[in-house]
Amino acid sequence: MPEEISGKTVFSLYEVAQGIRATLAKAYPNSYWIKAELNKLNYYPHSGHCYPELVEKRDNKITAQMRSNLWREDYRRINAAFIQLINEPLKDGIKILLQAKIEFHPEYGLALHILDIDPGYTLGDLEREKQESIKRLKEEGLFTRNQELRMPLLPQRIAIISVESSNGFADFMKVMENATTTWGYSFFHLLFPSLLQGDKAVDSILQQLNQIKKVAKHFDVVAIIRGGGGDIGLSCYNNYKLAKQIALFPIPVITGIGHATNQTVSEMVAFENAITPTKLAEFIIQRFHNFSIPVQKAEEKIIDKSKRILEEERAKLKTAGKLLVSVFGRVVFNERAQIRQGIKILCLQTGFILKTNKEAIAGIPKQIGKGTEYLLGQQLQQLELTTRAMHRGGGVKLKDSSQGLIRLMNQLQQMAILGLKENRLALQAVEKNLENLRPEAVLKRGYSITRVDGKAITNSAEVNPGDLICTTLHQGEVISIVNPSS
């Protein structure tokens, strides 16, 4: 009860609190459904109770704030419902639709006693944000912009946005390193650390994308890698700003953010997405397989074809060699026979020519003598006639006859010299032909003489396998062993 102090009615703090409690209980006797943002869950594991901090925001400013109570049994039930429907537990930063009673405690003050939370509302809020982002991106013509880029045939240089300690990043790197070890593929990667979930994830990822954009020419792709998680943990990937940045990025963006439910907007606008980091790494490796397997098959075909061509050409060369040896042998044999025949004919002709020329030369003195005798006889007759004429008185004619005789002797001398000169030239021609037919001259022109046991052979039938043959050339000799014919 209030008391009077100095003429004033004074209530104790407890009485005021109790009055407020009674008034609120009378004014708000029932429970109410309230929508708010779960700014902080404030879960205490030792007791199992939660003391959620609820807020309402407009234009990113807090317009209302109130604490609440969620007792252990209610928390377990509600949390299980969230995990079953959304695959995520209750956590900070989500919008919820809660059923609560308004309570006032004299010691702890005003609070909402949470009786239930509808997980369907939270999931629906996420879906609304997702659909709004999709609609805006399509209206602006950005939804497929990144997918229209051209990824390099072999994406080797990878900028990775992830957390170094996350399982998703470890799984991705394990697959890539195994590909290097097993198949010899070469990669370069650089990690750009970032938060991957929660309210701050969007700004963190955007910051790293801006860093990568500055050095985009040094990379082939950007990979956003995150470990497992449910839909609530992925709500940041439905953010319009993040999805727009991915859509407009100058190089392909690929995602592996670790979930098997509906795609987020960021995954939809990315060049390629995979349900896990492992699958994303396998996507990159598969591009290398698609390139290397045809190359390997082509290499095998080239090697096989080259071997066949070499074998065929080797066989052709062997056959051509045998044919060449056979033809060359026949040609050499025929040429050798013709040379021998030519030598015989030349020797006969030379002998005949020498004999003929010798006889002709031997007859020249006789011819000269006979001609001289004949001419001298004529001149003597003429001289006698001249002498007789002189006796009859012709002194001048004697003188003329004497000069005529001198001219005749000069003519005879010149004829003899000319005849000897012509026969000397004929003899020189014969000697030259004989010189060309000498064995040394014949060998110099490329022919050879083959002997077995010192005896020249003219037929291949004269040698047997294993015989030692000596081939005489213009300069030197070649010793050979006859191989059996194949």
Image: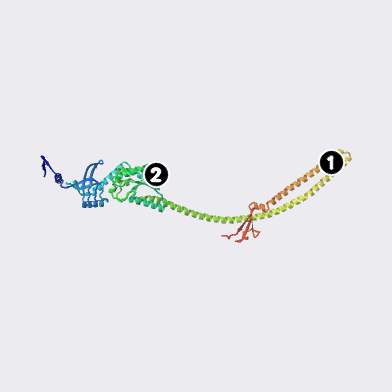
Nearest to the observer: residue 44 or residue 311: 44
On screen, residue 348 versus residue 39, left or right, reads: right
Q: Is residue 271 visible?
A: no
Report the coloring of the rendering.
rainbow
Q: Which marked residue is nearer to the observer: mark 2 or mark 1? A: 2
Nearest to the observer: residue 307 or residue 360: 307
Q: In terms of sequence position, does the residue under pointer 2 or pointer 1 come before the other?
A: 2
Direction top: furthest residue: 396
Query: Pointer 1: what residue?
Result: 402
Which percent across, then down, holds residue 477?
63, 55
Alpha-carbon span between mark 2 and mark 1: 125 Å
Which percent across, then down, holds residue 57?
24, 42
On screen, residue 88 versus residue 29, left or right, reads: right
Give the number of callouts.
2
Task: Give neighbour class at mark 1: few <14, some 14-19, many 20+ (Cα, 10 Å).
Answer: few
Determine whether 240 is above or below 311 in the image.
Answer: above
Nearest to the observer: residue 273 or residue 13: 13
Looking at the rendered image, the quarter that the N terminus falls into is top left
Query: Pointer 2: what residue?
Result: 218
